[in-house]
Amino acid sequence: MLGRMQEWPLLIHRIIDHAATQHGSRPIISRSVEGPIRRSSYAAARLRALRIAQKLARDGYRQGDRLATLAWNTDRHFELWYGISGMGGICHTLNPRLFEDQLVWIINHAGDSALFLDLTFVPLVERLQPRIPSVRRFIVLTDADHIPQTGLRGVIDIESWLADADGDVAWASLDENTAAGLCYTSGTTGNPKGVLYSHRSNVLHAMATSAPDYMGLSSRDTVMPVVPLFHANGWSLAFSAPMNGAALVMPGAKLDGPSLHSLIENEKVSITAAVPTVWLGLLNHLDATGGKLGALKRVVIGGSACPRAMTEAFETRFGVTVAHAWGMTEMSPLGSFCSIKPDYGDLAGEALLDLKMKQGHAPFTVEMKLTDDAGRNLPWDGRTFGRLMVRGPAIAGSYMNDDGGRILDDDGFFDTGDVATIDPHGYMAITDRSKDVIKSGGEWISSIELENLAMGHPDVSEAAVIGVAHPKWDERPLLIVVPRPGKAPTHADMLAFMTGKIAKWWLPDALVLIEAIPHTATGKIQKTTLREMFRDYQLPA
Amino acid sequence: MLGRMQEWPLLIHRIIDHAATQHGSRPIISRSVEGPIRRSSYAAARLRALRIAQKLARDGYRQGDRLATLAWNTDRHFELWYGISGMGGICHTLNPRLFEDQLVWIINHAGDSALFLDLTFVPLVERLQPRIPSVRRFIVLTDADHIPQTGLRGVIDIESWLADADGDVAWASLDENTAAGLCYTSGTTGNPKGVLYSHRSNVLHAMATSAPDYMGLSSRDTVMPVVPLFHANGWSLAFSAPMNGAALVMPGAKLDGPSLHSLIENEKVSITAAVPTVWLGLLNHLDATGGKLGALKRVVIGGSACPRAMTEAFETRFGVTVAHAWGMTEMSPLGSFCSIKPDYGDLAGEALLDLKMKQGHAPFTVEMKLTDDAGRNLPWDGRTFGRLMVRGPAIAGSYMNDDGGRILDDDGFFDTGDVATIDPHGYMAITDRSKDVIKSGGEWISSIELENLAMGHPDVSEAAVIGVAHPKWDERPLLIVVPRPGKAPTHADMLAFMTGKIAKWWLPDALVLIEAIPHTATGKIQKTTLREMFRDYQLPA
């Protein structure tokens, strides 16, 4: 027997409809790429999104078409998300930080039929144009006064394009499982893969993360998403802010400390979210100027592990609560959030900071499990680490075009590629990437934990740890160190320093000093290159 | 093109799974019907719910079976909700405050095949038993030591019934639109109608109401649902509390002021919810004893309009925030919640109290509109009142068995039967029931507003207003007054008192003094009876 409730598909346009109806005058404040601050509202943004949907349909774009954006966080980019998905299109956010070859590959793989771009990216897209034939026209997110001379196909500025659209149309009527958004993951191996969000997944994700223990946005908040909309579904803030009537402050192209600080202060931002490097810039600026963070209550930090000193600086020097979050493009993206459950309500000082270094606990709609190499469940004891597997309605079930084939285990869990511990209260801590973990005698050694420990030695400038082949133990850890100028720590020095701080069998079998450790474009240690460099390394007997 | 997200149906068991996994040790504290306080946890409740599901299946109950409860808010009732829906059954909550004939009618209409009842209700159910043949067995929510001698068919206490079940079963695998809960509305006309909730509607409703502007429950809260689970889906608290890891305090059968106060104080309740009459009992108790409300932060008041003095008492004398809420059984039930949007952030004192008398604004997943008799949309100006129509995924689309036929308008909106205003910021205020509103010359007059005004006259003990036939204006208001002892206000007195406080054409055409106004069992004015009494009333020329 079925229930007798109304059919009300979970469609993205309902979010902006709700915002326009219930929070219509709440502002969207945007640092424009042209320069000045622009002020809009949810009611105005909804109308513009309808005009975009109307123009797309008139121009012959159809449901299922991939419509790409190459843009900063601005009001116009926000409106495109709703306009594109609201006409049944798939909003494909491109990451301008990728190499040009990757962008070309991704645009062709997606078969994007239009590209909306910020002024910043006109020269880049001019170079790409000959190699991306599926893109029929290029629409620049500016007005007639600011559009430059360019040979882009069918180019027009968005204001001229929208001029003859009054927005008097209805949103597309769609199945809630219709694809709405597309974001590629740039895995370290193989080609990028397309994560295809549905209307349902985006709506459910925004609802789940709105709960007080997670993003917890209210109509009294002013949210500044510094994390770009093109990064991991923009952490869903373009959905959760309007859903809850929180005002939006969009920082545009300027993510430096002074620019962010002036927005936080002038617009009374209460919550903001970004990766750690952005906050380093802000904290340095505050150090240099003696600036304060007046209305700011909460900073959400994710994308990579948040340094302890950063959490400490925000909390003790500025009275701003730091919430460590973890997620993936494949998870829409939120997987966990480190708010404080009552089980840890008495923690303070260093013990509280220890807890805040963990990635946190999963919201409703995210199920987690830890498994060993044989797929067996491991205990949540805060010590045992295993592969972190996740399941839920806003987690990828497969990639676009079935690239990569089957990606779920028999119980429908997705392998995050991370190795983690989970404690009895559900707090998850990433200990390594599963491809970097060192497998010694059937047990796992965390390369990251060894690196963090080695980094504490005064002679060490940077450290990396990889597994190298061992006849008896399968793999053993090799410690690779960039020494500080004029220093040359020995294997014995490092062992003396590390002994007693980790299990004895975790101690590295050897030490190599090198001049520089290779990094990825985003500053992470390039372990594949290190493994290549030390492929034939022979451990001492 | 469809998205590529995981299939993860919105099933109720996922809520208790999440609670057991992420908040397993959070307590469920229950005043048992036997007397003592019982302490359980979400992890323990999940296991017991699985044992219930296991036993139901073993006893031959099947998906779609209606399994009734006649019970107070206790841990056992909570577990039944999950056990019944988790095996695919429909949890049918019966309201013990109904007349016996109504209970018999409802049980037979639903075709309940088992009935779980509290000790309190054994004598009542013994009387009903001969008239409810579909009920194969009666399970009393107690243990072998406390079960009385009774001739109920197949009677057993739940602890003996569960003794041989270990809970080692899986939840039923179901379509998310499967019926999960059943609650009858007792309309003032016609037979009661069954509202059939689905797994999807209950999960979405709990998610939507978890947002900070609405119930806003967090893992640091301790929630006491005084509103019974059998009343309007228990305001969804049996879903939203575990979904967010809030501890539960279940008050059992004792809803008097002293009993509630001792639970609030001893168990450090932070949020509680009930109808106004319950809070009257609590406030009277506090007055008499000088008691305080230590940890209590928020009281949610709904079910009928919250008196201004009550809001004032909680907020100014006890420092507890009052949130006025409105809903219906047909809405799962939350329709609106009166939290303070930034548009009204500067209100204080009487102006803030004025706002708090409104029923509040709709959460995401609830759409509202106001219409006139011709179905045309009316403006949200805070003055114009019209029929309040609602749409959303947790709002009834039809009643069980299609009783009452089509209940939605052409746009899929459900008629609440209320007349309301909505202001430009979305704050809705109920002004009347649509069948009580007085239609004069094509315009509407609020009977409730006239009554509230007349009640302010010092000679008036109680007042009611109904529309009576008028040759020119269709209907005109008749004021019916129960005078205070020894008083006899005249029509002229009342007009003098009311003039200037309402539109002139709203003034009642006549006054009748009577000794008593008829009331329903729940204390509301019985307008149908009044209209019957004054059916032939002739207005003075």
Image (cartoon, coloured by chain):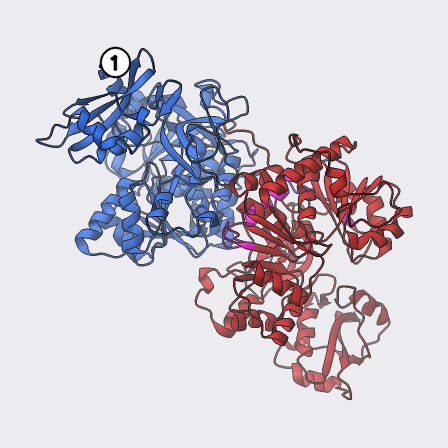
Chain colours: A red, B blue
| Nearer to the camera, B498 or A176 | B498
Q: Chain of mark 1?
A: B
| Quadrant showing the C terminus of chain B | top left
Q: Is residue A244 left or right of residue A167?
A: left
* Above or below, comparing residue A308 to residue B372 in the picture: below
Measuring 28% from the left and 45% from the top, which residue is drawn there? B310
Q: Residue furthest left?
A: B486
- Relative to B253, A271 lies left or right: right
Residue at position x 83%, y 57% in the image: A99
Q: Residue furthest bottom?
A: A486
The residue carrying mark 1 is B535
Is residue A428 at all visible to an observer of this figure?
Answer: no
> x and y percent of residue A470 in the render?
79, 71
Describe residue A155's horizontal placement relative to residue A422 as left or right.
right
Residue B233 visible in the snapshot: yes
Position of residue B231 measured from the top left corner of the image (x, y, whole percent): 36, 35
- In the depicted view, which residue is nearer to us: B182 or B315? B315
Position of A35 with respect to A361 (left or right) is: right
Where are the magenta residues, as a range?
A: A193-222
Q: Quadrant of the N terminus of chain B?
A: top right
A218 magenta-colored: yes
